[in-house]
Image: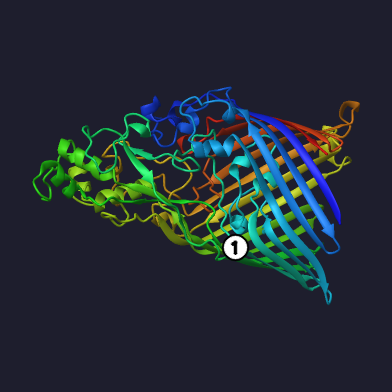
Amino acid sequence: MNVSVDTTISAGITMRASERDCTKVSLVNGGCYNGDGRNTSINSDNGNLNYDQWDFVNQTLKATVDIQGTWENYGFFVRPTAFYDFVYAENDLEFRNLSPNAKDQLDYDVDVLDAFVYGNWDIDGHYTTVRFGKQVLNWGESLFIQGGINAFQAIDVTRIRTPGAELKDALTPMPMLFASTTITPNLSIEAFWQFAYEYTELDPAGSFFSTDDIVGRGSLPGLLNAMVDNPDLAFPPGTFPPNPLVPIAVQRSSDRIESETDQFGVALRYYAEELGNGVDFGFYGVRYTSRLPYLGFTTGPDDLDSACAQITGTGAVPGVCGTAPTDPFNQAAFAYAAGQLKYFYSFPTIETLGASFATTVSGTAVSGELSFSPDMPFGVSDLEQNASQLDGTGASGPLTGSPGPVSQLPAAGPNQDTVHMIELDALQGQIGTVKLWGTSDPIPAFLRADTTTFVFNAGFVYVPDAGDYPLNRVGPEGGIRNPFGAAVLSPTFNNPQYATSFSSGYRMVFAPTYNNAFGTAFTLTPNISWRHDVSGYSPGPNTANYLKGMKQISIGIDADYQSTYRASLSYTNIFGAGMDNPTFDRDFIMASVSYSF
């Protein structure tokens, strides 16, 4: 048996480079309105408040070991990894320290990423491979943009954001059985069955890149009515608050995972050598459980009238609390009923059909993909969900002073779930190019570089009926901070915060390379990466999440010494899209060094 061991040890830092913008902080925590009267929810600003400008976001030591063994036509691969982050292991945060679950994801860990065995056979001229265990599977032709064919592949967002992270850190190995075989020299088939569920690891609640305090590990209770951002001060559920404006904590209930084992896919690949320089075609069918969560709510057992009856002792008489929104009994009854509300996350089944191509045109690698998901579930605006609870519990009229529903959704009565997903057909597409110029080409010659790489990736999301529903999208939702927060909606109100039918954007990377820079053995690669979301607002969560006007630029430099010692330094500026952009004030600097042996 042959066994090889490759180890990489790295150290890195991330630092916040921009000041906190007051519009990205809730009013309760000292924030302000933006120019069009919008502000950030109290449930969305802990990640911003926990870090001041020039604070360290990461101070990480990490080691990753690749162990591969082969014997005849069999083999195994294991990738253990460990890290320690001084920011979270040895310090408390600025505004509110992370919950134990969130901290466990960020302070230190030892884990095994990939761990699989495999075999290769030639069966009557059909070259066959079988792998079993935790492994990564990359289908489709996406370069940078999420969603599409490969949306079934879970990722670890926290690892991606770690300084010095590589692609192997980002993709989460999933427990599966994978097999492929050639049918003819130009035609092959692949298939997988995932026998245990794996979700995408989101930013922990309260961490630097987190934009929602109730999402991710360590998620907090959602706050309604809050004049102070502290779930510990919230009145206990099922009791009457002495003051109707005390915080109301919306507790999280159990996740709802539709299936952990009913996940599989098939891919057919064909190489058309007669077309141009040859074209690789792929055709895919995938069924999987969503790696990303869908937010929903369950109302409590009491409607407004029964809550009023318990307060006043008059019996459940409709309208006993009066119709004035400022009626104290009215507000107290609402606070009591809302205090029994719970939120949950669903992980529904998604089915996707897709096709891809890859070829070379005039020395440029060109690829693309198209995917169609019939009846894909899309998340519904949580503001609309809250409004539907007002309708279903009889609170809309008393809180607004006028009859009629305030939500576009069906009313959610006592002990009912809100409508939190709507199924619609979705089409997603991408195209990408990779161009490598040599020393004699004009651009490297002008830059005096040895080579220059340019990568381009553009895509779109098209959901024809998205504009007919109050679908959630990237960016802030107002949230409810008082009994009247959701009641400002009306059934005909076209809220500009909802998703649109069409959205698009692109990504680019430009990187010249200088071998033996300045007469040394170092290779230097300065680089610029650019993101621009051009149009529309993607419904989510399982799409590319384009946000019109959002831009991001990263400027950096990488150094490499004989593929053994590496260093990198970069600055990232996030801007554009105004209030819709949840992270426009979170620019950051990242630096890392690594040693491989």
Would you identify the image quadrant in which residue 421 lies?
bottom left
Q: Is residue 385 visible?
A: yes
Closest to the observer, 243 or 235: 235
Does 311 appear above or below 374?
above
- In the rendered view, would you say 177 is above or below 581? below
Q: Could you tell me which quadrant the N terminus lies in? A: bottom right
Q: Please, what is the three-letter code of the amino acid marked with disc 1?
A: Phe
Q: Which residue is mark 1?
A: 195
Q: Secondary structure at mark 1?
A: loop
Tell me if 212 is positioned left or right of 76 in this view.
left
Depth check: give the residue in front, 144 or 565: 565
- Left or right of 321? Residue 488 is right
Q: Position of residue 548 (x, y in %)?
A: 52, 43
Vertical side of 110 occupied by 359: above or below: below
Could you say where residue 446 lies in the image, as x and y percent from the top left? 83, 34
Most distant residue in the bottom direction: 124
What's the residue at 55%, 31% (across, down)?
A: 586
Residue 478 visible in this rendered orientation of the protein:
no
Q: Residues within 10 Å of mark 1 (few under 14, many from 20)?
A: some
Nearer to the camera, 121 or 394? 121
The picture quadrant where one finds residue 595 is top right
Farthest-out residue, right: 519
Q: Position of residue 501 (x, y in %)?
A: 47, 54
